[in-house]
Structures are given as C-alpha cells and as structure tokens.
Amino acid sequence: MADQLIRATAAQDGIRAISVLTTHLTEEARQRHQLSYVATAALGRTMAAGLMLASTMKQPQSRVNIRVKGDGPLQGILVDAGLDGTVRGYVSNPTVELPPNDLGKLDVGRAVGREGYLYVVRDLGHGYPYSSTVELVSGEIGEDVTHYLATSEQTPSALALGVFVGAQGVTAAGGLLIQVLPKAARDDALIALLESRLSHLQGFTPLLKAGKTLPEILEDLLGDMGLKLLPQRQLVRFQCRCSLERVLGALKMLGQAELQDMIEQDDGAEATCDFCGEVYQATSHQLAQLIDDLNTKTGS
Ligand code: ZN
C-alpha cells in the first residue's frame, strides 16, 4: 500500500485522530543514509511524528521541524515535514547499533539518550516560525513528542509510533495521533477512556503487520465514539528540497578567495546534502561564474 495519511474526528469533534503509513519513505531514508537498525527506527518514528504534526496545520506552505538532541550515541535527529505530505530528515550518527532493550525492541531510547531536548518549530510559511523546547522524557520519541504536545501546545494527546526493520529493510512503519481538542479537554471520562484503549494497543507496527489498514485501525479504536473519517487520504513521501542551484548559492557565500582556492586546488567542489545524502558536483567553470557574479555585484 502507498504511504499515506488519513484524518478523522470523533466525539462530536472533541477528538482529532490522524494516522500515517510511512513504510516506503522510511525504507528510502534507510537506504539514502545507510542507517543502522536503531537509527532507522529513531528517524522513522520522528518522520511519522513530523508528518502528523504538520497535518494539523492550516496554511498550505506550513512545515514542522523536529530536532532531537540527546546524550546518546545517535547524537541528534533532524526532521522537516510539510503539510504537503513531504518529509526529509537525518541522524547525526547513522551507524550506531545497540542490543535490544528489555522488551526485545530496538533501543531507540538509549540510542537517542534520556537527557536532552526536543525542539519543535512550526513554520506557517510567512516568516514568523513558532518554536518551543521541552526536555526529553525517555528518548523513545513517542513519549517525548506527547510531552511536548501536552506542555507546549496544551493539547492532551496520545501517540503511537512504530518502525519494523528486518534484514530485508523496513517492512512496516507509521503512527497514530489522537488529540483531545479544547471543547472536550475537560471531559475527564473521555480522556480516561481514550487512555485505557491506547494502553491496550500493543504498538502500531503489529497492527500493520497483521494486515490492518489505517481506516480499520481508527475504526477499532474510535468506531463506537462517533468516528468520522475525512474522505481525502493524502499521499506522503520522502522528498528533499535541495538542488544544484541551492548548493551553488551556498558556495557563493564562501566568497571569492575560497572559491578561487577550490578551482586551483580541487578543480571544482563537491557538496553532500545532509537531509537526503544527494552529492552535488560544481565544476571549475561554475565556480568561476560565481566569482564573476560576486564581482559584478561589487562593481555595480
Ligand atoms: Zn537534499
């Protein structure tokens, strides 16, 4: 099934539910960055969370950046996700591998580290991003983002994130976000009921591996609470915004002396995009043109 995101409401719009399937895009990230098992899980969970947070925004250009900075060997995660369904991201140390945790699962918490911060930036696309920082709870990503939503955005939320990666790569990945909206936020019975149902959910990937579709998963959880699935499903994908033009723009900032040096020493320049791993080559001719541009600007 294609990677996709669906939205729903329940309890007379008192509950917002979002579910996302990210198997293919997580596998693409794994291959692009040559991620270890635990790094795949950490980045995959963060990308699913980013897509779901972005999907709650309204302006078409809206994007969410999630940065995780813990004291574990993974060192850091950065994810950039848009309301348009695109996501990209990377981890600082993609080769980290750790033994499974006590539950026999990939030990994302230890790889990320339990001490550190989660930064979230919501950008509406017109230059005034809203950013907020919380301390990490466990480094498992799901709990950390839930904590962020409860404290920074005052939205009680339940979040399940999962990435199953085996010898053949990623075979199931995605997430589920259920939020109690302001009109129902004082309904303690509703919140207790949701918490109890979610606590019985044995993770998200087992449901996908059992062949459940996203609508079926939401139906099982909220079907008796007036679930209304929004008709449009949105396709989601790994997509970077880098290009040779952007790379040349960044090289130009280095200035004439440095560019001249690259021409003379290396006969060009090579730059790798952190977000997607794409390698760009700039020829001496292109670098010389940048120098020309700089001189024309200074001259005019
Ligand atoms: Zn890129």
Image (cartoon, grey):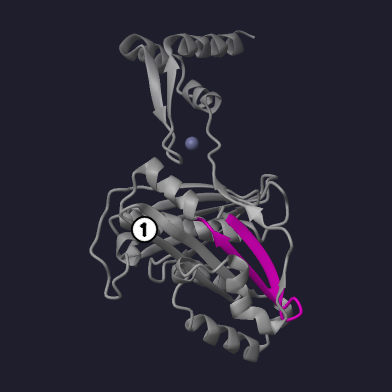
Identity of the residue furthest to the left in this view: 99
Whole-percent x, y for residue 9 in the image: 71, 72
Identity of the residue furthest to the front in this view: 211
Q: Residue at x 64, y 79 (%)?
A: 222
Q: Give the position of the C terminus as an image quadrant.
A: top right
Residue 71 appears in the picture as rendered = no
Whole-percent x, y for residue 294 in the image: 54, 14
Q: Is residue 20 above or below residue 29?
A: below
Circle 1 residue: 165
Whole-percent x, y for residue 165 in the image: 36, 58
Q: Secondary structure at mark 1?
A: strand
Q: Residue at x 50, y 21 (%)?
A: 252
Task: Classify residue 117 as left or right of residue 34.
Answer: right
Magenta span of residues: 4-22
- Is the residue marked 1 within 8 Å of ligand 1, measured from its CB? no
Q: Is residue 286 above or below residue 167?
A: above
Residue 199 appears in the picture as rendered = yes
Q: Residue at x 44, y 65 (%)?
A: 162
Q: Give the position of the N terminus as an image quadrant.
A: bottom right
Q: Quadrant of residue 223?
A: bottom right
Q: Quadrant of residue 104?
A: bottom left
Nearest the viewer among 67 and 100 is 100
Nearest the viewer among 261 and 56 is 56
Q: Residue at x 61, y 85 (%)?
A: 191
Tell me the amino acid under the disc marked 1: Val
